[in-house]
Image: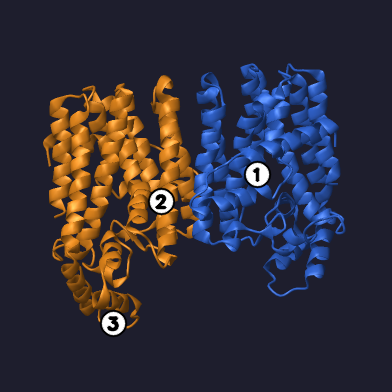
Chain colours: A orange, B blue
């Protein structure tokens, strides 16, 4: 990773460590500190800084407002983990496991208020309304995406288009907003702010497709979770939905049989479904679509009127993320 | 109830019926419409209109921003009902019962975003930052109050002062903010906005003490819930906490025995605890404190520079609420 990027992340982490949410009651505020301190790449506020820097060099000015995006992101993690009954987050107990569900609900609620508070404190008055309007739209879509994701688990048939739109809402629009926030704060043109947003959405969809691919094709030694987990749980990823759409005859029957099976050997199911993916050329199709989204995002980056070195840094960061996970 | 008040409530209900939150996914937005349509007194946005009218007659200008307070209030109901495992709200199934918990969490989250959106859309640009700063403080305190309330259930000893501060945060500050919002929107002086806020907090604490009294002394025929419910469940109300503080000797022992009992006849427990309250003069003490809070609030109303008829209307409304529940 580029040294500047490391420096930005260090400065973001320093600001996060200094940001206070409240003290009493402890049950309300300790979960916030706990979750914010679990770390993560700080990708979203970092994108705000990188977006800011395209237009203005004093990226540090944007740090406090950028932290609002990280608070919001962690709020969604706290509540999504309850809904998904997830026991672990970044290898540690989730808030509802470590404390309890009511605390995770309420602590998350106050985090959402604190995200707004962080914007209201740190965004200049003449940009506040625009930032909050864009943030509201983003926050609404993130909730819609999570609901669609939960709905898809119960639905018999989900189209590839519906899936792409769900991941756009659930994860990509927040990357778009993070970049756009940097643009707005830097005083970039409306056109460039839109390009930043669109780039974030496209790259964000690309990242999610990459996650879908990795779950099946990652190197187990380097991968944090069980490779093939999505296949085992019939998760409706881009790979499975594409296979279901394209499979015909015996291949379709075999895929549906594996999905319907309740008793099976996990490794055997993973191998069998992978063989079907192989037959249907699913890996290459997913890689191509992922590449299309990344390319589209990078083309939008090129169109932005901004500092060339800052563009290079942003592109390097995205490419680092893409390579690291391969 | 005064005809003007009825008219205001009708106009608020009309605006609420016209306010759209979103359409898809239906699971996210139907619970919002469901809860907002269950009704209620619309007391909070009504207070915003009454607060506005002290300074300016065109109260209708304040309606759209006032709806934000009602959205926020209903968001707290949706999430509190999950935490409290409440099956019913206003006589109908709660959202987590009618749908499920994940939907109630997520639908509540989007409601909180929509409350902010309603402010951002409808509060004039030059008042927006002030309104949002005050709202953030209020929303934070409402969450803190709910957490304290949950904590108190588990704590062996809660002081009367802690209890008053909990009800101040959990319910009274939102009445204060609702009134203050009307003041800010009407362009009232800083001093008057502060008086409006303080009045709302004082009257709000008075209302909560009234609720505590009613649970023990209401006429069962007119009361919606079981009279004595708080005694049966050992709820730490002002009455019980004051009794625990003041009881000595045999009276203290008897009260503690009733609290510790797991098998008991409900009517017998209610009668026994009421007899202890009688001995300790708890009813009159609670009434006196309640009256002190109401009087303080009404004195603050008198100090506000505002239209006398509008003051009279506000006072009439509070007195109607007080009398109706006796």
Along the line of sight, the residue nearer the viewer: A96 or A162:
A162
Which comes before the other along the chain, label 2 or label 3? 2
Where does residue A117 sit, x and y in percent of width and height? 45, 33
Q: Is residue B190 visible?
A: yes
Q: Name the secondary structure under disc 2.
A: helix
**The disc numbered 2 marks a residue on which chain?**
A
Q: Residues within 10 Å of mark 3 (few under 14, many from 20)?
A: few
Q: Is residue B319 above or below residue B241?
A: above
Q: CA distance from mark 2 to mark 1?
A: 36 Å
Q: Residues within 10 Å of mark 2 (few under 14, many from 20)?
A: many
A103 or A75, nearer to the observer: A75
Proximity of marks 2 and 1: CB atoms separated by less than 8 Å? no
Chain of the residue where label 3 is placed in the rendered structure: A
| Secondary structure at numbered mark 3 | loop
Q: Is residue A174 above or below residue A253?
A: above
Give the camera-side residue of B61 and A125.
B61
Q: Position of residue A149 (x, y in %)?
A: 40, 57
Quarter of the figure that contains the N terminus of chain A: top left
Q: Is residue A259 left or right of residue B171?
A: left
Task: Indicate the quadrant where residue A310 lies.
Answer: top left
Please give the count of numbered marks on the rendered protein: 3
Which label belongs to residue B167? 1
Q: Position of residue A22 (x, y in %)?
A: 45, 40
The residue sitting at the bottom extreme is A263
Q: Which residue is mark 3?
A: A264
* Secondary structure under the numbered disc 1 in the rendered image: helix
Quickly name the residue at label 2: A145
Residue A33, visible in the rendered structure:
no
């Amino acid at each position: 990773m580029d040294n500047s990027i490391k420096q930005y992340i260090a400065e973001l982490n320093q600001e996060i460590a200094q940001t206070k949410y409240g003290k009493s009651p402890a049950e309300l505020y300790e979960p916030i500190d706990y979750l914010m301190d679990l770390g993560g790449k700080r990708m979203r506020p970092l994108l705000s800084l990188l977006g800011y820097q395209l237009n203005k060099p004093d990226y540090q000015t944007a740090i406090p407002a950028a932290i609002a995006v990280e608070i919001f992101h962690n709020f969604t993690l706290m509540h999504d983990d309850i809904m998904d009954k997830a026991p672990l987050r970044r290898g540690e107990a989730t808030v509802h496991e470590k404390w309890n569900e009511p605390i995770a609900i309420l602590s998350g609620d106050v985090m959402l208020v604190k995200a707004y508070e962080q914007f209201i404190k740190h965004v200049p008055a003449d940009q506040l309304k625009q930032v909050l309007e864009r943030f509201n739209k983003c926050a609404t879509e993130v909730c819609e995406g999570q609901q669609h994701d939960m709905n898809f688990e119960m639905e018999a048939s989900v189209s590839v288009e519906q899936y792409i739109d769900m991941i756009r809402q659930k994860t990509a629009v927040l990357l778009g907003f993070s970049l756009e926030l940097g643009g707005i704060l830097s005083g970039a043109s409306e056109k460039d702010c839109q390009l930043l947003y669109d780039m974030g959405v496209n790259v964000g969809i690309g990242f999610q497709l990459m996650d879908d691919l990795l779950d099946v094709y990652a190197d187990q030694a380097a991968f944090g979770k069980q490779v093939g987990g999505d296949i085992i749980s019939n998760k409706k990823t881009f790979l499975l939905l594409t296979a279901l759409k394209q499979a015909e005859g015996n291949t379709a029957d075999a895929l549906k049989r594996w999905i319907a099976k309740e008793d099976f050997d996990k490794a055997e199911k993973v191998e069998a479904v992978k063989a079907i993916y192989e037959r249907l050329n699913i890996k290459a199709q997913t890689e191509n679509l992922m590449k299309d989204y990344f390319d589209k995002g990078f083309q939008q980056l090129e169109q932005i009127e901004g500092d060339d070195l800052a563009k290079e840094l942003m592109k390097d960061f995205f490419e680092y993320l893409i390579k690291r996970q391969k």
